[in-house]
Amino acid sequence: MARWLALLPILAFSTVAAAANGIDLNVNDKAVRVTGELQLRRDIVFDASIYHHDDRGDVFGVGIHATGAATGGPNPLRAGLGARLFRIDADVGARDSGTALPLGGFMNYRIPGYDRFSVGGSMYYSPDVLSFSDVRKYWEYNAWAAYDVFRAGQVYLGVRGIKADFEDSPEVTFDTGAHVGLRLKF
């Protein structure tokens, strides 16, 4: 059963990539993340992602979120709350993989008067009770500032942190730093 649970994020990424409503690609010197997003309903979003770091390892994930306007007005704060399932394979030792189910969410704010500019962020945390196999904790944060080149295409600068605690290995920092990205909506 644990083997199938570990393969779920990889299989889901393949499915979402084939039917995606949007793609997010971001990179820095050592890491790349690709995320596919599928709008199931107006207020439910499913996503799948692959993160690869040259030296630290890989994180495969799927998530589902309820989304909506967190404020009123013409430029509302958009937000989403939900959960993600991650398969984490670190390159630090013999026992350095597992699964985590972090809870969290995201928000995005379009700046009034500057409709092409937006800022946003996300945060997810999985304590020991929601972490399995050799993973003891997982946490991730992201923040970004974006510019809409055209309605369906956006470029952005961001910062992120991705860390995992393992049972027999030290805490692994997958990423803490800046990245550049591109988002496309279909």
Image: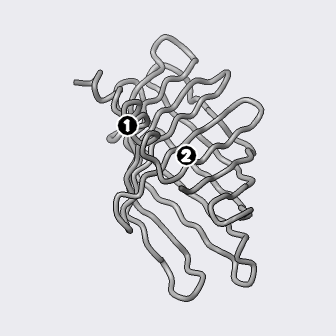
Quadrant for the N terminus, please: top left
Quadrant in the rendering for residue 6: top left
The residues tagged by marks 1 and 2 sit, at their Cα atoms, a distance apart of 20 Å
Which residue is most to the right? 29
Give the answer, above or below, for where 28 lies relative to 158.
above
Work out whether residue 41 or residue 102 is closer to the camera in this orientation and state it: 41
Where does residue 161 sit, x and y in percent of width and height? Answer: 63, 44
What number is the disc on residue 12?
1
Residue 49 in the figure: left or right of residue 84: right
User: Which residue is pictured at 55% across the width and 80% down the height?
Assistant: 76
Q: Secondary structure at mark 2?
A: strand
Q: Nearer the viewer, residue 136 or 122?
A: 122
Q: Is residue 40 left or right of residue 78?
A: left
* Residue 63 locus on image (x, y percent): 40, 48
Q: Is residue 117 left or right of residue 69?
A: right
Residue type, label 2: Glu
Near-viewer residue (99 or 44): 44
* Residue 182 spot, x, y in % from top left: 68, 50
Residue 13 sits in which quadrant?
Answer: top left
Indicate which disc, 1 or 2, sits on the residue closer to the N terminus.
1
> Residue extending furthest top?
94
What amino acid is found at the position of numbered circle 1 in the picture?
Ala
Q: Is residue 131 left or right of residue 89?
A: left
Q: Which mark is residue 140?
A: 2
Looking at the image, residue 128 lies above or below residue 147: above
Q: Are marks 1 and 2 in contact (CB under 8 Å)?
A: no
User: With respect to residue 107, does 184 lie above or below?
Assistant: above
Question: Count the marks: how many?
Answer: 2
Q: Residue at x 57, y 37 (%)?
A: 163
